Amino acid sequence: MSEELTQEELRLRKLEQLQQEGRDPFAIHAYDRTHLSGQLVEDFDELEGSQVSVCGRLMARRGHGKSTFADLVDGAGKIQFYAKLDELGEDSYAELRDTDLGDIIGIKGEVFKTRSGEVSVKATEWTLLAKSLRPLPEKWHGLQDVEMRYRQRYLDLMMSPEVREVFEKRARIVQAAREFFYGRRFHEVETPMLQTLYGGANARPFITHHNALDLSLYMRIAPELYLKRLVVGGMERVFEIGKVFRNEGIDTRHNPEYTLLEAYQAYTDYEGMMELIESLVCRMAQAANNSLQFTYQEHEIDLTPPWRRVTLIGAVQEATGVDFASFEADDDARTACVDLDLGDIADETYAGLLTRAFDKHVEPGLIQPTFVVDYPTVISPLAKRKAGDATLAARFEPFIGGQECGNAFSELNDPIDQRDRFEAQVQAGRGGDEEAHPMDEDFIRALEHGLPPTGGLGLGIDRMVMLLADRPSIREVIIFPTMRPER
């Protein structure tokens, strides 16, 4: 029998003994905690000598015969407590020494500082609040055992304060975003996650079925078209933070389920959205790191506005020498891109080649915050055409740390043009493009009632947390990432 199973059996026997004695820890419903660990440290001058109650998970213990030092971890950090045989009594002290690491206990006692200067609690009473029936990992191999960390996130959080800090930082980032939009008189709304027709992005959806209506439904790939319907209805400033679902691969930047922030503001354009994104991301950075300067994967990044702006075609030409503005046909672009290491380009279009060249040769070098502007209209089916050049859309994407973190544009509000764009997307879908946008007749009908000039943006919350928490993978910032089932 393995060592781990032996420990589990021993813990189970301890629980059974307690239950037989009428002291079942799982029968306890609550514990009257007076302070969190962090409060004892921060307010020590006021609390020294006072009686407090703390509780948490027993994570370490150092015995010295008739006295014991131990570490208790709660939601605010770690606090040390000190227990003595002559203070607790022989039976209580022996039972405390017999608890297991991982058990959840409550401690009542006096706040003091040890000779080494550590704030501690001198125990006068203790209570077992929950029994841990499995031992803590003896040696936690964080980076070496990534699968276990993601599957058993509770152990990851339990053993690694740095992991808890990431998700606490994530919470501050989301809170800062909400406060930012509330301060600009935006209304937070919720739009359907189950939709009869998906839209708002070029992506493959997940399909499910509603039994009562015998109806196929799609998990939303974006809230965009519903949010713009609200602007048509007179809600001039709206935003939503919520899950979207895209049936795509998994890598360091993609998870099938992720969190997207979208916002729409009437009577502004993509220039207004650039200012809004600069201000929003700076607010997030202040909430996360108390600074506009931070390190991401060994790169020193400075978010101080204004951010650099480059055109998509200009950035590709600067990096590769290929001038996409000079091409008149797809064949011309394919010929010019032969030596750019873009994979199989035999059937690729002008727009597809431009996107591939950018992804390969430009994006990894966009470390400092940069707006890449003016995307081809053919790959921007929901964006207004750029004034003076109908082949380009008034669209931009922000890049930080060598990755795209959002998308924004002046919203297309011409229903006739929008119908034409949808029809082109439908044709692309018939030609094999699984991510083509479907026709949405009700959205066209909404536009026919009149959408004012509007700017819109989408910002990936997970990628922003990756940046501001300096994490290389999206799985590090999604608390329960999508995983294959355990075998």
Image (spheres, rainbow, N blue to C red):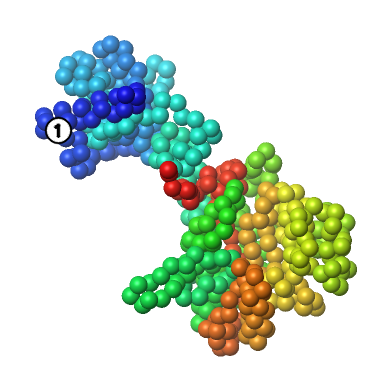
Instruction: Determine the residue positioned at 61% across, 68% down.
Output: 434
Q: Can the viewer see residue 225 in this picture?
A: yes
Q: Which of 155 and 145 is in front in this view?
A: 145
Q: What residue type is labelled 1?
A: Gln
Residue 159 position, x and y percent, is 43, 33
Asked if residue 382 is positioned above or below residue 345 in the image, the reply reads below
Q: Which residue is drawn at 72% across and 73% down?
A: 378
Among the 4 quarters of the image, the one containing residue 131? top left
Between 378 and 231, the one lying in front of the other is 378
Q: Position of residue 309 (x, y in %)?
A: 76, 60
Above or below, 399 against 396 in this view is: above
- Mark 1 crowdedness (10 Å alpha carbons): few <14, some 14-19, many ≥20: some
- Point out residue 146 in the picture as x, y percentages from the top left corner: 51, 38
Q: How many labels does the image show?
A: 1
Which structural element holds mark 1?
A: helix
Residue sitting farthest toward the top: 65
Of 79 and 451, the residue lying toward us: 451
Instruction: Identify the image quadrant of the C terminus.
Output: top left
Residue nearest the viewer, comparing 131 with 41:
131
* Quadrant assignment, res 313: bottom right
Image point 72% across, 49% down: which residue?
364
**At 53% across and 32% down in the image, what residue appears?**
144
Position of 177 compared to 371: left or right?
Answer: left
Q: Is residue 329 above or below residue 113?
A: below
Where the N terminus falls, by quadrant?
A: top left
The residue to which callout 1 is attached is 19
Residue 442 relative to residue 154: left or right:
right
Percent of width and height locating residue 387: 77, 77
Task: In the rendered view, tell whether residue 22 sits above or below residue 218.
Answer: above
- Residue found at the far left of this picture: 21
